[in-house]
Every structure is written in structure tokens, then in C-alpha cells.
Image (cartoon, rainbow, N blue to C red):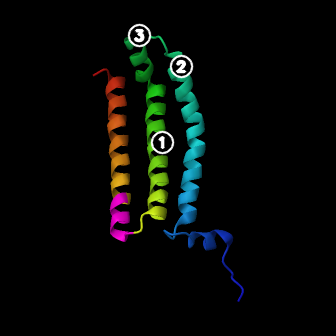
């Protein structure tokens, strides 16, 4: 029988979690976003090597650097959560443990994003 579904629609139904294409796509998009963000962070931190505390704090506190720092943190932890979810779905066999592990992973990544963002905001505001 001939299938009239597109390749994407067929891919959406594949995989152990029944959403393999979505996880794959999120992982790729976040990886592409991380390339310039991590390059910016690496260069910025390298330029701060040997700097005193106040100049490093001023660098983090500048508006563009604060926004980019929070964006880097959010995208990095999103990428981490998606990657860990795929690993858990593939290797944890017990459904209850699988669901609990995925929820815990996403919750921890969310909390780390909030905590890191608040730390950057506190530095930016000088408090």
C-alpha cells in the first residue's frame, strides 16, 4: 500500500519515545545556536584572563554581555536536557523510572537556568 505521508510525518512517529525527529531537531538547532554563543564566551573569558575582580565583574555587568551570558546558559542547559532525555529514553527500561528521570532532569536544568540567570542579573545590577 502506498503511503501519502511526507518524510517528516513518518519520522515523527519513529523512535522509542515516538518523537525522535523533534528531539533530533531541537538538539541540532540548540547546537547551532551554541556555536557563536560559546565562541563569544570563550573569547570574552580569555580576554579577562589576568584581570582583577572589578573589571571582570564590569564585563559580566555590561548589558550586552549579561544578555548573551543568560542566553548561553539557557541554550546550553536546554541542549543538556534534550540530550539527557534521549539517553534516558534509550537506556532506562522501567517506564516509571524513565518518566521520573526525565522530569527530574528537566526540573534540574530549569532550576540551574533560573539560578544562573539570577546570578548574572545580580552581578549586572551591582548587588
The mark that comes first in sequence, 2 or 1, is: 2
Q: Which residue corresponds to mark 2?
A: 46
The mark that comes first in sequence, 1 or 3, is: 3
Q: Tell me residue 93's x, y (percent).
A: 41, 68
Q: Which residue corresponds to mark 1?
A: 76
Residue 89 higher or lower than 43, as above or below: below
Q: Quadrant of residue 112?
A: top left
Q: Which residue is drawn at 49% across and 59% down?
A: 86
Q: Tell me residue 36's x, y (percent).
A: 59, 35
Q: Give the range drawn in magenta.
A: 94-101
Secondary element under disc 2, as helix, strand or loop, is helix
Classified by dominant secondary structure, the portion drawn in magenta counts as helix
Q: Identify which residue, 65 or 35, lies in the foreground.
A: 35
Q: Is residue 99 magenta?
A: yes
- Whole-angstrom CA distance, mark 3 to mark 2, is 13 Å
Q: Which residue corresponds to mark 3?
A: 52
In the image: residue 72, left or right of residue 119: right
In the image: residue 29, left or right of residue 82: right
Residue 3 higher or lower than 19, as above or below: below
Image marks 2 and 1: residues in contact by CB distance under 8 Å: no
Q: Identify which residue, 72 or 87, lies in the foreground.
A: 87
Q: Residue at x 70, y 89 (%)?
A: 1
Amino acid at each position: 500500500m502506498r503511503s501519502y505521508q511526507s518524510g517528516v510525518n513518518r519520522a515523527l512517529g519513529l523512535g522509542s519515545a515516538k518523537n525522535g525527529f523533534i528531539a533530533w531537531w531541537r538538539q541540532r538547532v540548540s547546537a547551532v545556536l551554541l556555536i557563536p554563543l560559546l565562541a563569544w564566551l570563550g573569547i570574552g573569558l580569555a580576554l579577562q584572563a589576568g584581570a582583577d575582580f572589578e573589571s571582570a565583574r564590569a564585563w559580566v555587568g555590561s548589558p550586552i554581555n549579561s544578555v548573551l551570558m543568560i542566553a548561553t546558559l539557557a541554550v546550553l542547559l536546554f541542549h543538556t536536557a534534550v540530550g539527557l532525555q534521549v539517553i534516558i529514553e534509550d537506556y532506562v527500561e522501567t517506564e516509571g523510572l524513565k518518566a521520573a528521570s526525565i522530569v527530574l532532569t528537566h526540573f534540574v536544568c530549569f532550576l540551574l537556568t533560573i539560578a544562573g540567570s539570577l546570578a548574572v542579573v545580580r552581578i549586572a545590577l551591582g548587588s
